[in-house]
Image (tube, grey):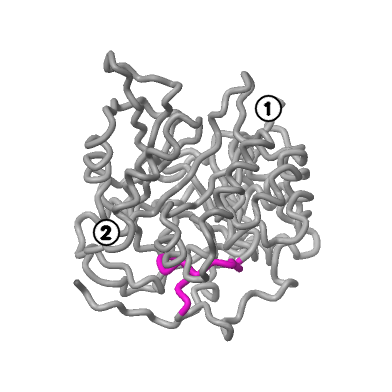
Amino acid sequence: MSERVIPLVDQRLQALAATIPSQAIAAQGLLSDSLGRPLHDLRISVTDRCNFRCNYCMPKEVFNKDYAYLPHGDLLSFEEITRLAKVFVAHGVRKIRLTGGEPLLRKNLEILVDQLANIRTPDGTPLDLTLTTNGSLLARKAQALKDAGLNRVTVSLDGLDDAIFRQMNDVDFPVADVLAGIAAAKEAGLGLDAQGQLTGLKVNMVVKRSTNVDQILPMARHFRGTGITLRFIEYMDVGATNGWCMDEVLPSAEVIAHLQQAFPLIPLEPSAPGETAQRWGYANAAGQFDPALGEVGVISSVTQAFCRDCNRARLSTEGKLYLCLFATQGYDLRHLMRQDGTTDADLASAIGHIWQHRDDRYSELRAHQPTDSAPAVRRVEMSYIGG
């Protein structure tokens, strides 16, 4: 196994200026990048802080008591986030996901949820508004988030065994409290569709070969038949501080093989264009998909890149626009927005210009490069722009 290397660098300092092009780019909902990919999803990080220290995201060796987080004045205000969100929606965004860090650490987050929930697309459709959380604060916040207009929630949970879970979060946090948060989200109605069916409550499990492979089947058994969709994520080389090496990646094909030891599965069609997860449904005795048993998903960004369909942009907590989870630089929208005289049309032109020149496809290119060591280039950290 490769030696773990943790470079002590601050990924946040690298940024490109967001400029207004000489020829205006109007927001008409038809924006595409250089590879023909539309802008459909926006992930907004609302904080760079987290109360967990998962070693694949915020290892304690780097994010310790001396780590310098962003000062509050550098963060986008809720009003600034909402302003930018409206511009992105005019360009074609239909789904917004709030992330962190741990987004529920941002004080009064339900106020932002309410503001975003009131945004409508040009044809009058509400946004698909969702949030990713570690679940630690969800039990006390679920109802307020639902009341504010949050549609769905995804909870990160890397195992049911309490000892393994405490080892992975590295702050001795009990798994029971996360399960209580998931139960509270379900009770509040987060994830219910228009027909009252639970389709939008998801649990994500990052799989590391040396740590939690034996949790795959227990997790599947626990959530099967509950209406909650469990998704398994390959351990990714995001950022530069998690000591990533290919030895720790369990390919999604092996995850499915583990599951098929206990459950008959059949492949399902993607739920939407650009869907990152490959869907598998639990089959009944007749070998047909049984919606009552539910489904699982696998996200294979290491072994089966999905760059060609990627329609996601990421906005950092201090207003930098990133075009890829593995980006090395972002574009500073905050500086442009806070300049006197900058109009929404100016912001639309700047964002349009950036997206039209996007050609990112890191995971696709990585398949042809060595993957057995930590990245040699500085890349933005997952804890800074969200997963």
Judged from the image, the secondary structure of the residue bearing numbered disc 2 is loop
**Crowding at mark 2 (Cα within 10 Å: few <14, some 14-19, many 20+):** some
Q: Is residue 384 above or below residue 21?
A: below
- Marks 1 and 2 close (CB-CB < 8 Å): no
Judge by depth and name the residue closer to the eye, 296 or 24: 296
Judged from the image, the secondary structure of the residue bearing numbered disc 1 is loop
| Residue 222 in sight in this render | yes
Judge by depth and name the residue closer to the eye, 273 or 117: 117
| Residue 83 in sight in this render | no
Which residues fall within the magenta stretch? 48-60
Q: Position of residue 61 (x, y in %)?
A: 45, 81
Residue that badge 2 annotates:
209
Judge by depth and name the residue closer to the eye, 69 or 256: 256
Tag of residue 125:
1
**Crowding at mark 1 (Cα within 10 Å: few <14, some 14-19, many 20+):** few
- C-alpha span from label 1 to label 2: 42 Å
